[in-house]
Image (cartoon, helix red, strand yellow):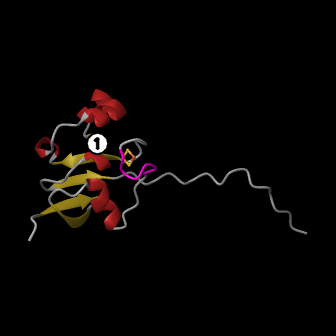
């Protein structure tokens, strides 16, 4: 039986196996989060803010440092796809931005 950790995401408490990617735990619980690369560390959209437990997480890796820079990292921001869960944390996930609909022709009432 694998060890579990507790995560609070936007105040919603959930559990995941130790070693699970934070992005995966968030998506498995149907919490909306932006991603365009499927967790490969390429899109930099899966930004979350760690509000509790950031000191217990592994240090940001090179992908996170390149994507976020020292200022955002010092404020607790991380890439959810780069964090392997090892301890209980609390996270704020921003609400995904609405997708643009493009320039669809306007319908006229006739
Ligand atoms: S999901 Fe694309 S960088 Fe994390």
Q: Position of residue 80 (x, y in %)?
A: 30, 49
- Name the residue that disc number 1 marks: 78
Q: Is residue 53 above or below residue 108?
A: above
Q: Position of residue 50 (x, y in %)?
A: 24, 47
- As drawn, is 33 to the left or to the right of 71? right
- As drawn, is 109 to the left or to the right of 76? right
Task: Determine which quarter of the picture holds residue 29.
Answer: bottom left
The quadrant of the image that shows the N terminus is: bottom left
The quadrant of the image that shows the C terminus is: bottom right
Q: Which residues are magenta?
A: 35-40
- As drawn, is 60 to the left or to the right of 39? left
Q: Position of residue 77 (x, y in %)?
A: 29, 40
Q: Toward the viewer: 79 or 14?
A: 79
**Residue depicted at 25% across the width and 54% down the height:** 21
**Residue depicted at 42% across the width and 54% down the height:** 95
**CB at mark 1 closer than 8 A to ligand 1?**
no
Question: Callout 1: helix, strand or loop?
Answer: strand
**Residue depicted at 68% across the width and 51% down the height:** 102
Is residue 59 rendered magenta in the image?
no
Q: Badge 1: few (under 14), some or many (20 or more) residues near its Cα, within 10 Å? A: many
């Amino acid at each position: 039986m694998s060890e579990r950790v507790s995560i609070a995401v936007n105040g919603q408490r959930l559990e995941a196996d130790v070693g699970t990617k934070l992005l995966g735990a968030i998506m498995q619980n149907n919490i909306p989060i932006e991603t365009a690369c499927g967790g490969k560390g390429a899109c930099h959209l899966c930004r979350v803010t760690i509000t509790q437990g950031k000191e217990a997480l592994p240090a940001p890796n090179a992908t996170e440092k390149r994507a976020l820079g020292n200022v955002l990292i010092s404020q607790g921001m991380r890439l959810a796809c780069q964090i392997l869960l090892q301890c209980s944390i609390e996270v704020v996930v921003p609400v995904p931005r609405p997708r643009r609909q493009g320039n669809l022709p306007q319908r006229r009432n006739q």
